[in-house]
Image (spheres, rainbow, N blue to C red):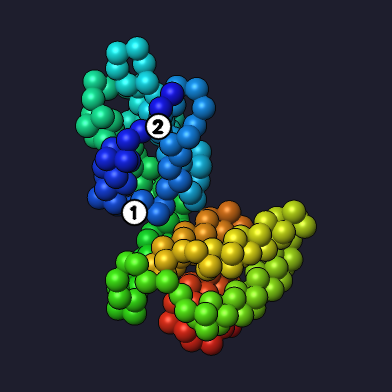
Amino acid sequence: MGQLRRKFQQELIDTLDQTSFTSYDFQVDYDHPDDVIVLIEFISDPAFSLEIRQLAQNLQVTTRPGRMLSEESYTAHSFAECLREVERWADNVLEELRSSNPLYEEIKSWRSEFEEHLKTHIEGEDVHFTGSEKSDLRRRLDTLEEKLAELGRQAELTEEEIEELRDSVETLKTNLASFKKKTWYRTAFNKFAQLVYRFFDSDQGRELMRSSVKGLLSGDASPE
């Protein structure tokens, strides 16, 4: 099956950006097998997903969660109808997060602070890191990686989970070479938020995540 045209891909991204989230909160896959033309997963909890399938004459949208059930499917007669379902689904995800995870409101507050800081400190959307900036951030990420591993041991995470923490930081280091600044920082924020959701529900863990993001963005000393 052919891939969704770029025009419609951009419309989808714009729709996600107009919800309570941003498009950076989601993994959007246009290369899914079979008859799925779009698969969207909420990065911090991939169990929250939406998929659009091509039927004979129409489109089918499957959302997790649905409006009332944990999974529901709807028939759409146009891509515009699919986008309206994306908006409803994002609202459903927000409701589930608020009702099931007390960390959500705290991380939402961090995001507001982060976006304001990003807007103030980085001009333009197309700016890349300089060589010295990449070296400095790699150094900070090296320090953060060790602190995360130590915090993971204190939280009695398994070796596999600690290795996953390290892999997350290593991915951020690799992305420095190709990502634009704002894209990299937003990706880093989402990665840290995901780690908080999955592994660190202590005051110490949350504070490390918060200070890490602020430290990486502002250029302050590595987070304590």
Q: What amino acid is at disc 2?
A: Gln
Q: Residue at x 77, y 57 (%)?
A: 159
Q: Residue at x 47, y 84 (%)?
A: 219
Tag 1 secondary structure: loop
Q: Nearer the viewer, residue 95 or 211?
A: 211
Image position, residue 223 (x, y; %): 55, 81
Question: Is residue 14 positioned above or below 192 on the image?
Answer: above
* Residue indicated by mark 2: 3
Q: Can residue 110 be seen here?
A: no
Q: Nearer the viewer, residue 170 or 114?
A: 170
Q: Earlier in the sequence, mark 2 or mark 1?
A: 2
Image position, residue 43 (x, y; %): 48, 49
Neighbour tally class for label 2: few under 14, some 14-19, many 20 plus, Cα within 10 Å: few
Examine the image and state in which quarter residue 61 appears.
Answer: top left
Question: Is residue 6 positioned above or below 20 on the image?
Answer: above
Image position, residue 106 (x, y; %): 41, 63
Q: Residue furthest top?
A: 56
Q: Residue furthest bottom?
A: 221
Q: Is residue 141 left or right of residue 26?
A: right
Q: Nearer the viewer, residue 98 or 37?
A: 37
